[in-house]
């Protein structure tokens, strides 16, 4: 009798779960919110006027245990200023085929230029598409920001940027542009 009931007893689990309501997630249509401190896609942040926070120090690349980050720094000039300091990250790449999402790069960044967003949908059918360049990592421009390169806000120093006292606003117009002539409307 036990030879006969043995296989049927094994189906007890199957029969008990067969009539339960299925726990289906409608993922693409209904997204479950992530935790506030979720480690998702990286983002290169900007100051309030649009200058980049990355100073090209390469500490994030050195801290990465998976060697997924490549940074090449360059010097700022008065004509082309990308960050308030002396240097900026000219080349910035994160290889998401290697990234393990540990967040050590975030902790190593001295200017809080690199943070992680809650974005987790990074699947791609092309391996080259998972190597994010600087243009895909930079934070989008908000209202009042001007895309770099542009000069620092008038009357500010690099220390003002690092202290967070610079507010948003457009950079001054370049000297190459002619100023508007107010008397032009009075002429016949």
Image (cartoon, helix red, strand yellow):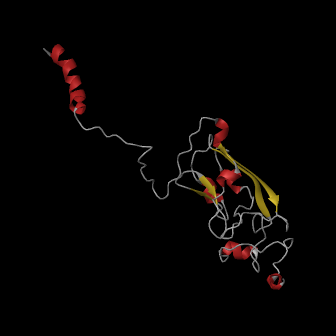
Q: Residue at x 75, y 78 (%)?
A: 156
Report x, y in % for residue 5.
16, 18
Tell which of 74 and 77 is nearer to you: 77
Q: Quadrant of the N terminus?
A: top left
**132 on left or right of 27:** right
Res. 141 in view: yes
The relative height of residue 87 versus residue 183 in the rendered view (above or below) is above
Residue 118 against residue 2 in the figure, above or below: below
Q: Quadrant of the C terminus?
A: bottom right
Number of numbered discs present? 0
Q: Is residue 97 left or right of residue 158?
A: left
How far across and down, in percent of the image, does residue 45 sit? 64, 61
Locate residue 21 relative to residue 81 in the image: left or right.
left
**Residue most extreme to the front:** 188
**In this view, 109 is above or below 10:** below
Seen as rendered, the residue at the extreme left is 1
In this orientation, does residue 62 appear?
no
Quadrant of residue 98 in the image? top right
Residue at position x 58%, y 45% in the image = 100
Closer to the camera, 19 or 158?
A: 19
Q: Residue 143: x and y, percent?
A: 62, 68
Q: Name the residue nearer the viewer: 151 or 55.
A: 151
Residue 135 drawn at (x, y percent): 69, 52
Q: Could you tell me which residue is drawn at 66 percent across and 75 percent down? A: 163
């Amino acid at each position: 009798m036990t030879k006969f009931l043995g296989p049927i007893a094994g189906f007890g689990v199957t029969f008990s779960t067969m009539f339960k309501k299925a726990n289906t997630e409608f993922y693409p249509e209904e997204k479950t919110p992530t935790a506030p401190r979720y480690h998702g896609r990286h983002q290169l942040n900007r100051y309030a006027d649009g200058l980049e926070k990355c100073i090209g120090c390469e500490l994030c690349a050195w801290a990465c245990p998976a060697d997924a980050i490549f940074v090449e720094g360059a010097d700022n000039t008065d004509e082309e200023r990308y960050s308030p300091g002396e240097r900026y990250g000219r080349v910035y790449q994160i290889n998401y085929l290697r990234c393990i999402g540990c967040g050590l790069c975030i902790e190593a960044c001295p200017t809080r230029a690199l943070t992680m967003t809650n974005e987790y949908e990074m699947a791609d059918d092309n391996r080259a598409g998972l190597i994010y360049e600087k243009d895909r990592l930079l934070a989008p421009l908000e209202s009042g920001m001007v895309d770099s390169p542009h000069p620092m806000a008038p009357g500010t120093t690099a220390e003002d940027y690092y202290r967070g006292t610079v507010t948003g606003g457009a950079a001054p117009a370049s000297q190459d542009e002619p100023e508007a002539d107010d008397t032009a409307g009075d002429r016949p």
